[in-house]
Amino acid sequence: MSLIRGRFEKEADEKVLQYTESISFDWRLSHQDIAGSIAHTKMLAKQGIITAAEGKAIVKGLNEIRQEIEQGKFKYRTELEDIHMNIESRLAEKIGEAGGKLHTGRSRNDQVATDLRLFTKEMITGAVGKIRALQAALLKLAEANKDVVVPGYTHLQPAQPVLFAHHLLAYFEMLQRDTGRFSDCLKRADVLPLGSGALAGVTYNIDREFVARELGFNQVSNNSMDAVADRDFIIEFDAAAAIGMMHLSRLAEEFVIWSSPQFGFIEIDEAYTTGSSIMPQKKNPDVAELARGKTGRVYGNLMALLTTMKALPLAYDRDMQEDKENFFDTIDTYFTTLDVFTGMVKTLKINALAAREALEQGYLLATDIADYLVRKGMAFRKAHQTVGKLVSYAAAENKPFNELKLKEYRSFSELFEKDVFDITIESSVAARNVTGGTAHKQVRQALKAAKKLLGGVIDR
Amino acid sequence: MSLIRGRFEKEADEKVLQYTESISFDWRLSHQDIAGSIAHTKMLAKQGIITAAEGKAIVKGLNEIRQEIEQGKFKYRTELEDIHMNIESRLAEKIGEAGGKLHTGRSRNDQVATDLRLFTKEMITGAVGKIRALQAALLKLAEANKDVVVPGYTHLQPAQPVLFAHHLLAYFEMLQRDTGRFSDCLKRADVLPLGSGALAGVTYNIDREFVARELGFNQVSNNSMDAVADRDFIIEFDAAAAIGMMHLSRLAEEFVIWSSPQFGFIEIDEAYTTGSSIMPQKKNPDVAELARGKTGRVYGNLMALLTTMKALPLAYDRDMQEDKENFFDTIDTYFTTLDVFTGMVKTLKINALAAREALEQGYLLATDIADYLVRKGMAFRKAHQTVGKLVSYAAAENKPFNELKLKEYRSFSELFEKDVFDITIESSVAARNVTGGTAHKQVRQALKAAKKLLGGVIDR
Amino acid sequence: MSLIRGRFEKEADEKVLQYTESISFDWRLSHQDIAGSIAHTKMLAKQGIITAAEGKAIVKGLNEIRQEIEQGKFKYRTELEDIHMNIESRLAEKIGEAGGKLHTGRSRNDQVATDLRLFTKEMITGAVGKIRALQAALLKLAEANKDVVVPGYTHLQPAQPVLFAHHLLAYFEMLQRDTGRFSDCLKRADVLPLGSGALAGVTYNIDREFVARELGFNQVSNNSMDAVADRDFIIEFDAAAAIGMMHLSRLAEEFVIWSSPQFGFIEIDEAYTTGSSIMPQKKNPDVAELARGKTGRVYGNLMALLTTMKALPLAYDRDMQEDKENFFDTIDTYFTTLDVFTGMVKTLKINALAAREALEQGYLLATDIADYLVRKGMAFRKAHQTVGKLVSYAAAENKPFNELKLKEYRSFSELFEKDVFDITIESSVAARNVTGGTAHKQVRQALKAAKKLLGGVIDR
Amino acid sequence: MSLIRGRFEKEADEKVLQYTESISFDWRLSHQDIAGSIAHTKMLAKQGIITAAEGKAIVKGLNEIRQEIEQGKFKYRTELEDIHMNIESRLAEKIGEAGGKLHTGRSRNDQVATDLRLFTKEMITGAVGKIRALQAALLKLAEANKDVVVPGYTHLQPAQPVLFAHHLLAYFEMLQRDTGRFSDCLKRADVLPLGSGALAGVTYNIDREFVARELGFNQVSNNSMDAVADRDFIIEFDAAAAIGMMHLSRLAEEFVIWSSPQFGFIEIDEAYTTGSSIMPQKKNPDVAELARGKTGRVYGNLMALLTTMKALPLAYDRDMQEDKENFFDTIDTYFTTLDVFTGMVKTLKINALAAREALEQGYLLATDIADYLVRKGMAFRKAHQTVGKLVSYAAAENKPFNELKLKEYRSFSELFEKDVFDITIESSVAARNVTGGTAHKQVRQALKAAKKLLGGVIDR
């Protein structure tokens, strides 16, 4: 008979047990559960709610169970439903009746919330660490290629020349914002719910601040009903991960496009590509594609929990057990994606030649030529139209800008003079010398700032 | 060295292998994969593309592998990535070089699409069967309580009396539509992609119609690029399951509300409830709550695959490997939810007394009284207003309708006569004697039609 | 005082009125509402529930209101909340007390469900028509370019040569499935809810079958509670539209990639591109990009309604008013996207030369060479590996296949003979002569079948 | 001819114009657009990029346009596509060629990002203000009823008695976290993108810090490509609003349940309920239901933008125009929902009598009785089982706890003594005297802290 079915005459149906059990996934909270129980026990003993001897026996038992788990000797039993009951039941086997005192002054509702918050805090640290590693890899790749110019695109149409390093640093910025979101989430996760009981608080003279200190929480929760009903911190983590995966999906898309032979700007290391079962020539960017595809999964997990939490009356409802599996899946997906991206970026090769060829086709200097006219006194809108016609003419003649004659230029505006030929890919890059611009000077400063950031503390 | 990395110098990185492997979940397609391979092999031999002896050896080998799998003796190896390579590699161990001929005239792209379609077809049958079982349970419960009247609610406010059986049959209808959606999905799933090769068709003289017949497919695909790029059938299944779970979430909500002591209309069998770790009096409707919560998960899986498939260029992209895990999760979640609901409905008890008490409070007969005035000649809108005032008066006096005096009625309208007291809960139910209405006569017919339906064929 | 607040002492707060009103969007149902009311009125008169004279007056009044709406003279009033009350109130102005009899034997719950189903049926027809138009445009483009060969891609890596027409026909197939889903949705939308009353049926001797015939419904609903609580048909439409937009997003992605100068396979007509406010050379595929972007919106609308319907107790809850705006938005988005795609496809130009150049780079014939070895007796897996090595060699030598010497071929396998040079892009296409394959013969048949289909009835 | 189609021969198709225009919704950014343009103009003049006279003329013209907009005299023209072109075009009408200089040194890409960030910053302030108002209303309601005890529920089953004020303060906490998320989002929104040009920075000697100061931005963006490609701040707002709506949907659910006559704990003011078109007795909690339903819409909008942004290559793609409509819809939905909730809470009445009756049924004191046994020395698990049996017995006897005899208690445990009768609803509440617990003392402190918070600054 289950420990908590005192009132019941029947056992749960086998199918029901399979449906309601959580031990098949919440075993991942075993360390947090034990840590929480130990802190709770110490507090109970300190407050005289249990005796010092009982306290010692419980802590000793829990430490042994932790070892059993670490050594893979612990037997998880489905009929005990969840990690809490598995551990408590094993404790009872070990130390007898005193084990039954562990649950004094707490409920599974505040216990599982505590476990989840401890776990979330660790995962936030984990996420930030993995993002940092990818930032470092991007930074290194940027520095190693800091003079390579590539076509910058908008609408996947060539727009203006940019430094490859500048392009990579755009992702550095996105990742930096990602760390900010996780750090902010930490503020709301870092609150101890233990002591909230089932929903209303407990009737024992407990010391919540002591438990908070033991477990490293920054504060205790203000309202017991909210404390057991709140899963905002998981949704917020899920949302931060969804945005993070969105960023990676954009980089993935660029890797897929750039490594297509028609672009050919990069070569992804063989270790990050796979072959075809039928086409011997293939070297497919599968890792980037899978990462892009897994974005859907992380979005789906966010939607799942938002949907689950919709319209639940206070305080705790069993629907909330659905908070875990999707959360674990988001963590696993996001973390491994960050890892493989870090590896892929570290080994990526840029094909500067292909980029240069692409730069020389097309009319990426058109904006610079319009700006040239503006500097000679033309209003921007007019300059824009003038160069628009010039481009049409050049395209019809099938000539790049640098093969046009001055006479041809001047047929569009008398303002054109010989110095129009000073406009080159290099001059174009150099001219964008504003904060955040692609000029070498700016990018060097940005690289320096990025490097400094990575040497520093976690939050920006 | 992987069978398909002929061109490569390096092995994939270990993390990459973990990231890209699918054997940890696509083992669920092993039977479909073997069935597909056997049909393909028979066709290759029939067409003389391989020899009869080779064909026999391959089929024998595959049958042995099937047995190994059934007996739990088959070793799945992560480094072989997926179920296809695991089986093919084992085949090579068993029968040597002839094994290498199995993959003649096909690609993993059309192979996995075939496996998935075989699997989906089975799951559609499975879904319909499980829905049928729940329909049967609802029907039985309705028949067993066919005279019980309960308050019908709109906006969770008492509206009009209805037969409990009528209320249950509303769910029967929803489930019936669910079977329709799955059956419709079958039409689009029941198409053989094998023979489409990697994307363009194959160069061998294959016989696709033969393979379709062997595997029980209704037709062969019309376009090879579409055939390997299409996952509509999974999304469509996911959408049907999402709607199905939405229906179950509504029933779950009603079970939760009805079993709350303030309503107390039903008693959920103990086997489908659980206790509290701290509150000994609790008998919580956890199964219904979990089902309601799992709705989020099934919605999330639908969103995940839609997102994954967004904007993928033809033909196959590795993103599409993400089609499986969420699909399997939807199946497992939906199927077990249907199962536990069937069990819960079978053992549900209705508390007719509590329902009757609720009926007698409130003013559920107000519509009938307005209709009464209409029949005496008042326009409906006016009758509605008149009864509105009557209700306000009665509520202020704290009297139910049947305690009002005729004089009091007549102070609102001269049309009221003694026969207003003939309006009762029973007369109210009986009066709604239109197709689909709650009158006993109608509900009896509906029960009969439902019974007939369940005895008949799968689709409506 | 609102017509339906008979019991109330206070009017609704102004903010509440703004929050709860639906006339700002449900005016779109005005024609359906009037059609439904006319059919209902005719039935009431036929059954003697109202007099013939009353019936005539109501129908005449409704027809006049319809005209006022068509002529833009009808004044929608927010304080009347919804389209039903706006029309009924105007009717009362026109014909006096008889107007109050229109609502006899029905409720807003079954009325709005009827309006929505009439509307959905029209929208299904509309969707199928617009899909047909895009199919026709694709077909015409395919026929006009039926000998153009392009690289077929998997993983955005060149895979095998395919006919451009074959590639386009893959989208024809997707669109064909889309029409199937809409047609299937029609089956479940084509059910008359009127007569279900608020939730329990009505107390009048109505003739539901008559109303169904008048309005062109295929059947009447079986259960009154389900009839007012059901919005499956909208979710199902939303899901079909979401899959439809997913298909269009794939085509959009290909248009974006193909029109990028690095690919340059197509030229999108100027009418379907836009310029840049700053870069005069730009010709951006904005229409394709917007279509791709709007996919998110249609997915979001599906998610929204699924979420809204989750866990709603029977029968009607006001949450369900949220069924309309997102539905209208999905219709507008999907329909205009189909329209602009049809126009874009009609005016699209293929750049066969650029495609040919791309075909000649790369090793798209590798599969054909492996198949060649298989035909000479090598097992497929071995052939695959052999050609893998051949590709590595050729790539290192920077030679396409057709510049390799026979001696070089034979250093990889003695099976290579002079006829290996017969393998060309043309032979590769021709060789895939299986149902659904890219061989000219197959594609011609597919074009013919597609043409026939478009000439025929709506459903496949 | 559009200002930006210099290179084009054809105008865009009419349907395309309708498809791509944004003026029908981005007119909402007019004030931000003008503010941004004025700051940009001042900077251009300060830097000598335009003359002081040109600068003055532009600023004067823009101020006049702002007035025209405020006075409703401005004509938005669809053929000018967006708000930027509408304003610039009007400026040209007003001041002639100098107007063409406004766009010097900027692009629509950085311009629209600037407008959106200015707008988002305002909306964050708006959201926090509206949340504060609802918090204040909850606080007032809590204070006005600070001695009312209600049953606290878990699983919608009575669990333990709690103060109604305690229950309301749980929502105060949720709302407090909501303000925290919006404030955190502000950090990432408060960054000036202007000066990033189309994607690479600009070629003029601009002063970005000056513009930032003029517009009140905290910093300038670090990377021009990221600056035009980033919409994180909108997604983050959407996610915060989704969580916020989830909280409101929970409160809505409770209002719906509590105002159902079977519960009857609250009475929603008539101004926040509506009647039925057919059932005169109805007083439906439509506002709460609509709020619950609109949760789906806000979730859908989040999903929509996440999907839209998935896998977009840098820097700007037209897909991103889809960032606005859903964002505006989320703002409108969330803000009006907060408003109507504030009004509804302000006018809510609690029915203390009904709550008391509910408290006296059921066995809400079971936990207290188990804790009693623990205090007498029994281990918690054993006490829980003992009381479980006691509850079964009492339920079978149909007696509440306070009608059981001591003898009956003692048949379950010898530890029961006369003082077991001291356990009452009041003692139960009082006993939960821990931080965050429901004891009067704790709740009074919580009310005090909440009041202090509302008097203080915006962020916690």
Image (tube, coloured by chain):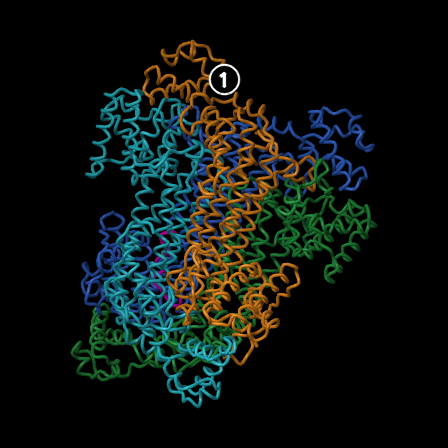
Chain colours: A cyan, B blue, C green, D orange
Name the one closer to the observer, D277 or B115: D277
Image position of A60 (left or right of B221): left
Q: For the N terminus of chain C, give its image quadrant.
A: top right
- Asked whether residue A15 appears in the rendered view, the answer is yes
Magenta-tinted stretch: B313-327
- Residue A204, given in percent of the width and then of the height, sits at 37, 22
Chain where mark 1 sits: D
Name the one closer to the observer, A35 or B105: A35
Image position of D44 (left or right of B160): left
Q: Is residue C291 above or below residue C300?
A: below
- Asked whether residue B139 appears in the rendered view, the answer is no
Instruction: Verify whether residue D377 appears in magenta.
Output: no
Name the one closer to the observer, A324 or C438: A324
- Which SS type dominates the magenta stretch? helix
Instruction: Verify whether residue B325 appears in magenta.
Output: yes
Circle 1: element type: loop
- Residue D183, given in percent of the width and then of the height, sits at 45, 47
- Residue B27, given in percent of the width and then of the height, sits at 30, 52
Residue type (three-letter) at the residue carrying disc 1:
Pro
- Residue C286, given in percent of the width and then of the height, sits at 49, 69
Which residue is the site of mark 1?
D400
